[in-house]
Image (cartoon, coloured by chain):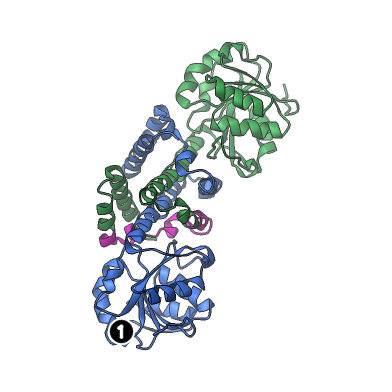
Chain colours: A blue, B green
Amino acid sequence: MKRSIEDTSIVFIGAGNLATNLAKAFYRKGFRIMQVYSRTEASAKALAQLVEADYTTDLSTVKHHAKMYVVALKDSTLSQLLPIMTVGREQAVWVHTAGSVSMDIWNGLVEHYGVFYPMQTFSKQREVDFTEIPIFVEGCTLEVATFLKEVATTLSRKVYEADSLQRERLHLAAVFACNFTNHMYALAARLLGKNQLPFSALLPLIDETARKVHELSPHEAQTGPALRYDENVINHHLQMLSDEPRLQEVYRLLSRSIHEEGRP
Amino acid sequence: MKRSIEDTSIVFIGAGNLATNLAKAFYRKGFRIMQVYSRTEASAKALAQLVEADYTTDLSTVKHHAKMYVVALKDSTLSQLLPIMTVGREQAVWVHTAGSVSMDIWNGLVEHYGVFYPMQTFSKQREVDFTEIPIFVEGCTLEVATFLKEVATTLSRKVYEADSLQRERLHLAAVFACNFTNHMYALAARLLGKNQLPFSALLPLIDETARKVHELSPHEAQTGPALRYDENVINHHLQMLSDEPRLQEVYRLLSRSIHEEGRP
């Protein structure tokens, strides 16, 4: 059976940050979002309203005749719920959106399945431009992979096929480049806030740090006291953090790690 | 004596990343760079050529009649060399550019002194737009502070006065927001490189992570497995890092730290 992206109706299982942003992007491109499931009624309802969909908090009432089911749940919930949600809906294409979960999770449950992984940081409060987001797809057959690529191409100019091994490596790197990076911003914000200094003072520095690695490799772009191994500054900073043992531990480990990576 | 920024001739002590970028910015604005000192001849010469200055590698031959001396040395070298370099040049304004060094370091050496701290990450290979760089100045007298503000205003739209205590806190926060952030990029690049995946795939994510905190606080912007406390993913990632004990340690500490900061 040849699948066409025309009239692709979609059910979203999950209404978190990723589901919200992805469902909105599909909706804007004219896909029909049939229904949103979330365990949390407020989340299901909020997303359903945004994309003119029905919603449910009961997996057994998830609609049966969507062409595609997009499962965007916390990874630990995912494997528990898959067997329940797929029963009676085996004709559709099923995808999950998790960087670190293998495609094989679908094995034996449904016939047409794959992965649809947009590598980006999503928050409900913030609109993102999907056209620039790399989307990594994987399909259980050539037919499904082609279908998912077609679907992804309606949203983004950067669509790639990646197998489960490549995807989990991308995801791990993304945790460093995004989640840990944002945590560095958060710790900086906390240090400034304690001293009534505005976080906004750091924005030009944050922006330049990101822009810089478009031109130089991160290794070449590295600067700062840890790289110079400026012990005066490092020790002074550790002392300034004496009332923040966790930040002190982070400072010490990352300074050592920078030093061990070595000079450009 | 009222100091005017007209005909301000400048000697640079140091020819590293910061000195290079700052000297070039002054030069472009029409300041006369008289001389560049660096212990390393190649560095002194390279910068001197860029800004049409003389150069020396011998502190005793540093010119005597500049209006301003900008000292941009590694912090540990700074305090050793100050007494040597200032002798016979006490009439000028002396500034250092170090975030974490107190203004008092000049005390008893010269009469007109202060700090000129552009809070940015500088690499010799990369041009930066100085107009957006916050410059924090401090002067030993109102007269010097005013002079430094005037000088800084020729380069940047964002000039602030900050005392030594505020400046060292800004610098510490900057280490987190910039140096540690760039190190996260470097570790991500290493993980991808090991698997022949291109670092450029992460750039949209890196850019969005930076853009996001213009709109949301970093605390609100946080996402990822550590925040969700998704133990499946965290344990899987730690296992993937089993051949990289240092990265594993970083992953473990930062995941714990994110979790302890708590949900938005």
> Where in the figure is residue A98, as x and y percent of width and height?
35, 66
> Is residue A65 depicted above or below A74 in this figure?
below
Q: Chain of mark 1?
A: A
Residue depicted at x 30% and y 65%: A101
Nearer to me, A91 or B51: A91
Q: Residue furthest right?
A: B6
Q: Give the SS element for disc 1.
A: loop
Q: Evaluate whether residue A127 shows in this view.
A: no
> Where in the figure is residue A127, as x and y percent of width and height?
52, 67
Nearer to me, A162 or A248: A162
Q: Evaluate whether residue B229 shows in this view.
A: yes
Mark 1: amino acid:
Glu
> Is residue A10 depicted above or below B224 in this figure?
below
> Where in the figure is residue A48, as x and y percent of width and height?
44, 80
> Is residue B232 depicted above or below B50 in this figure?
below
Report the residue marked by disc 1. A90
- Most common secondary structure along the magenta stretch: helix
Quadrant in which the C terminus of chain B is drawn: bottom left
Binning the other alpha carbons within 10 Å of mark 1 as few (below 14), some (14 to 19) or many (20 upward) gives some
* Quarter holding residue B172: top left
Residue depicted at x 48% and y 35%: B168
Which residues fall within the magenta stretch?
B206-233
Nearer to me, B13 or B146: B13
Residue depicted at x 54% and y 21%: B106
Quadrant in which the N terminus of chain B is drawn: top right
